[in-house]
Amino acid sequence: MDSVAIVTGGSRGIGRATSLAAAKRGYKVVVGYASNKAAADEVVGAIEASNGKAIAVKCDVGHEADILNLFKQADAFGKLGVLVNNAGVVDATARVDEMSAERLARMMNINIVGSILCAREAVKRMSSKHGGTGGVIVNLSSVAATLGSPGLYVDYAASKGAIDTFTVGLAREVSTEGIRVVGIRPGLIDTEIHASGGEPDRAHRLAHTVPMRRVGTADEIANAVVWLMSDEASYVTGTIIDVSGGR
């Protein structure tokens, strides 16, 4: 396979697991990373050690110039087949009446605008309308979109609710152009994102609220992502799958 898969936020957590899983299925992987070059290089090294192909590209999806460069580098690497919109941020837990405009602007710019701009660039390359031969866009949402995350980060939940709506809308917009657009809503997953919100032990602390009584792993999310990427999911579009242990 000579198809390229771009994974934004691909150096850690769910992004790392997805990058490795995509490489195992034969994709050439572009590992997007915002700041941790060492982590991204480690992922590339792991893929190359298994005879896969990968490159790391610095890309803060909060900056359009970075996104344009990411896709330019991907173009030089091969033909784009998949975009995994994984990059996103969470902030310290807070009530809405404690949130600053700066916090909200950063959250929405990275989690929503960044994902839409990445999708825009992918559609330009994949769509039959633009001479492309199709592809798949997988958007990472969160069960927070359905739970609302009161008292924690309603803003993050709202940003992921927007991703759900965007997934459905874009899927229907490009459904006759060879592109499938799908989403994943992870539940409580054991990744570093909780630490960035000031609660590194949050997932395990709340494991009892999950019907399956445990947190999920990044690999369990990646397995769902790569299935959606595959031809096995060829009739799936505009769908968002909960991978949340029933939460």
Image (cartoon, grey):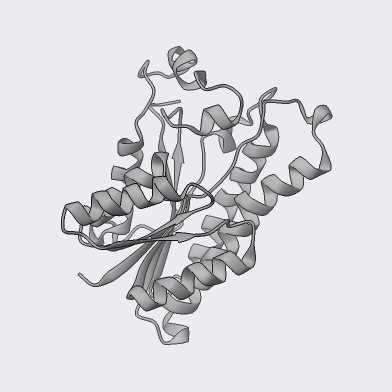
Residue at x 52%, y 71% (from the top left corner)? 69
Relative depth, front residue between 202 and 247: 202
Q: Is residue 212 left or right of residue 194?
A: left
Looking at this view, name the residue that lies furthest to the left: 51
Residue at x 48%, y 13% (from the top left corner)? 205
The image position of residue 70, as x and y in percent, is 49, 67
Q: Can residue 99 be seen in the rendering of this structure? A: yes
In this view, 171 is above or below 202: below
Q: Is residue 65 left or right of residue 210?
A: right
Looking at this view, name the residue that lies furthest to the front: 38
Position of the C terminus by quadrant: top left
The image position of residue 17, as x and y in percent, is 33, 43
State the count of labels.
0
The image position of residue 51, as x and y in percent, is 16, 58
Residue 156, by quadrant, is top right
Relative depth, front residue between 82 and 150: 82
Residue at x 52%, y 22% (from the top left corner)? 200
Position of the N terminus by quadrant: bottom left
Residue at x 22%, y 56% (from the top left corner)? 48
Relative depth, front residue between 87 and 148: 87
The image position of residue 168, as x and y in percent, is 52, 57
Q: Can residue 174 be seen in the rendering of this structure? A: no
Residue 61, by quadrant, is bottom right
